[in-house]
Image: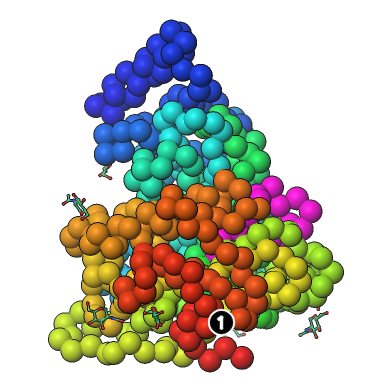
């Protein structure tokens, strides 16, 4: 109620400013925006008074029934509705929830309601932008089995409130069996197609929110970065976006074209002993929650899912070097980075332990570090513009065990500006690190063809191969919250990259 009347008075304030001509600024978006999916009224929350937010706008038809496992269909015009509360995220395969994230740091996860009807976007825009602003589209991580549009650490309202010069979009996409079924009868990566549809939806609609459709970038982390990079290979001609940021995860070297997992789940979901086509149809008719529970029962591993993208040669490809060689990639600038202690979070977590493991190199962690290094080197070798960074932060409110330090995902709360919201306020150094990263990200979104810079005038140099330079963020033994360092510093934390 309170939010609504605040919103109403805000609209009045906007029209008053327009009438008395006190402002040369373009008309602010207002809270009611016409889109191709309908006319949606957002809100202003008093905790971010200069940010308009729209939560839960549909970008696709609910992917139910015969649309399950299938490419998403554009949402029709649903008429007028409120966009003031998150919609459920897509079904997550969180297994037995024994990971350190679930036990200690749920703010990194999407822990709210889940549903199969989940294809929605959320937008945060400055209340009175000076111009059409650049747009950062966030693609969350979670191993293709978890993730979505509203983890507490991934709410960008404070970032937009502070800078007032960009829009951040978050969205849900289909996960695990729903997004990456791998059925032989449907070699479709529905979850990757959801990402493409969001980008198309934003191209058509972002101006209504004050955004510039010609200045949008994708920013993904972990499997979200995988999705961003796959997108760049899948859309060489019409990428729509103008740049990419990707951290802590890269493109897999190979992808099986089929997987037995869909079939295995079918055996316990009431679809046993059928031909591939009949199995697929049968599986489209299984109750969604029952299917979700079948997957959660079969795969209890809190860190690794059974369902991942398959090389369909449409959204993903078996040989990416070949695509680079043939120029079949969106030739856009890419920022790639990783954390200095990526693997720590994947150790088995015992909440009762009083002594804990020291910082370690976890087997397999190279998938998060080396794949970034390789991807950036490869792009650089083929003449694409690249930038690199190392995140060296070790801040106790976002990683509250001494052995975690700069673990996987730990730069996210600094970029989103949510780091101070749980387990105590941040140190001054942490705030300054956060500000620097936020500014570089927005600078890149505003113009990916210019070296990013922050408000202190620091410039992020292009990465020029193995002896090149990178940004180092949050290194307490370095020379400030952000500074240029040799790439060898980052590579000393990347494990045995071959
Ligand atoms: C406003 O923001 C606060 C703090 O982030 C949050 O708890 C609350 O749910 C928000 N209110 C609305 C209406 O979104
Ligand atoms: C599937 O086939 C196996 C082997 O022939 C059989 O044991 C099983 O009962 C069948 N299951 C169903 C649900 O028909
Ligand atoms: C959760 O699943 C993992 C992997 O299957 C297993 O190693 C672990 O023991 C399980 N933990 C609990 C509390 O059941
Ligand atoms: C994709 O292309 C590769 C090589 O061009 C081929 O080996 C593979 O069978 C193709 N996969 C599909 C699903 O068409
Ligand atoms: C991928 O393509 C590159 C460039 O064409 C080639 O050198 C390489 O052998 C290919 N890799 C595989 C596994 O086929
Ligand atoms: C993080 O900093 C603390 C001191 O504040 C130190 O004890 C710990 O070893 C550091 N952790 C890592 C992983 O570097
Ligand atoms: C949090 O820390 C910052 C930086 O030290 C300080 O400016 C701010 O006032 C603190 N906020 C609260 C609520 O204590
Ligand atoms: C921080 O900077 C120092 C000095 O440049 C370097 O030796 C160290 O490896 C960097 N990284 C971390 C995580 O401290």
Q: Is residue 300 visible?
A: no
Quarter of image, res 163? top left
Q: Position of residue 449 (x, y in %)?
A: 66, 53
Q: Position of residue 460 (x, y in %)?
A: 54, 62
Residue at 66% over, 41% down: 214
Q: Position of residue 121 (x, y in %)?
A: 50, 44
Residue at 20% over, 58% down: 425
- State ligand 5's quadrant: bottom right
State whether residue 35 is above or below residue 343.
above
Magenta stretch: includes residue 278: no
State whether residue 177 is above or below residue 166.
below
Residue 276 in the figure: left or right of residue 23: right
Residue at 84% over, 69% down: 326
Residue at 35% over, 78% down: 345
Q: Which residue is mark 1?
A: 370
Task: Give the number of callouts.
Answer: 1
User: Which quarter of the image is occupied by the N terminus?
Assistant: top left
| Residue furthest right as drawn | 326
Magenta stretch: includes residue 242: yes
Q: Is residue 147 visible?
A: yes
The residue segment tinted magenta is 232-246
| Label 1 residue SS | helix
Quarter of image, res 9? top left
Within 10 angstroms of label 1, few (less than 14), some, or many (20 or more) residues? many
User: Which quarter of the image is occupied by the C terminus?
Assistant: bottom right
State whether residue 464 is above or below residue 241.
below
Residue in the foreground of this view, choosing between 318 and 390: 390
């Amino acid at each position: 109620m309170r939010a609504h009347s605040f919103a109403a008075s805000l609209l009045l304030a906007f029209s008053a400013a327009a009438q008395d001509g006190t402002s040369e600024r373009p008309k602010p978006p207002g809270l009611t925006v016409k889109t191709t999916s309908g006319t949606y009224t957002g809100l202003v929350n008093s905790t971010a008074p200069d940010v308009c937010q729209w939560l839960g706008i549909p970008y696709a038809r609910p992917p139910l029934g015969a649309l399950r496992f299938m490419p998403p269909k554009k949402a029709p015009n649903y008429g007028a509705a409120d966009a003031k509360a998150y919609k459920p995220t897509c079904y997550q395969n969180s297994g037995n929830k024994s990971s350190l994230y679930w036990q200690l740091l749920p703010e990194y996860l999407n822990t709210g309601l889940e549903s199969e009807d989940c294809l929605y976007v959320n937008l945060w825009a400055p209340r009175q932008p000076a111009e059409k602003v650049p747009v950062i589209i966030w693609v969350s991580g979670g191993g293709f089995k978890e993730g979505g549009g509203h983890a507490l650490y991934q709410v960008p309202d404070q970032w937009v409130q502070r800078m007032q010069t960009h829009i951040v979009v978050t969205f849900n996409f289909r996960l695990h069996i729903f997004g990456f079924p791998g059925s032989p009868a449907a070699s479709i990566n529905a979850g990757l197609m959801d990402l493409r549809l969001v980008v198309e939806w934003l191209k058509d609609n972002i101006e209504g929110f004050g955004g510039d459709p010609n200045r949008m970038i994708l920013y993904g982390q972990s499997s979200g970065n995988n999705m961003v990079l796959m997108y760049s290979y899948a859309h060489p001609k019409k990428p729509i976006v103008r740049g990419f940021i990707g951290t802590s995860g890269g493109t897999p070297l190979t992808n099986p074209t089929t997987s037995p997992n869909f079939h295995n789940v079918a055996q316990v979901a009431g679809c046993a002993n059928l031909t591939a086509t009949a199995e697929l149809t049968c599986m489209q008719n299984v109750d969604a929650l029952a299917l979700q529970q079948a997957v959660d029962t079969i795969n209890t591993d809190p860190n690794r899912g059974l369902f991942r993208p398959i090389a369909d040669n449409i959204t993903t490809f078996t040989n990416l070097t070949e695509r680079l060689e043939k120029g079949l990639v969106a030739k856009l600038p890419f920022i790639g980075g990783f954390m200095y202690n990526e693997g720590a979070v994947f150790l088995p977590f015992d909440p009762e332990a009083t002594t804990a493991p020291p910082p370690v190199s976890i087997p397999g962690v190279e998938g998060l570090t080396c794949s970034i290094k390789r991807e950036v080197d490869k792009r650089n070798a083929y003449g694409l513009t690249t930038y690199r960074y190392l995140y060296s932060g070790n801040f106790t409110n976002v990683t509250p065990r001494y052995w975690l330090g700069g673990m996987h995902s730990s730069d996210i709360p600094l970029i989103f500006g949510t780091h101070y919201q749980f387990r105590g306020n941040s140190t001054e150094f942490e705030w300054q690190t956060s500000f620097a990263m936020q500014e570089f990200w927005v600078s890149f979104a505003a113009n990916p063809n210019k070296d990013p810079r922050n408000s202190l005038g620091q410039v992020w140099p292009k990465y020029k191969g193995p002896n090149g330079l990178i940004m180092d963020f949050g290194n307490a033994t370095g020379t400030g919250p952000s500074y240029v360092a040799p790439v060898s510093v980052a590579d000393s934390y990347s494990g045995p990259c071959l």
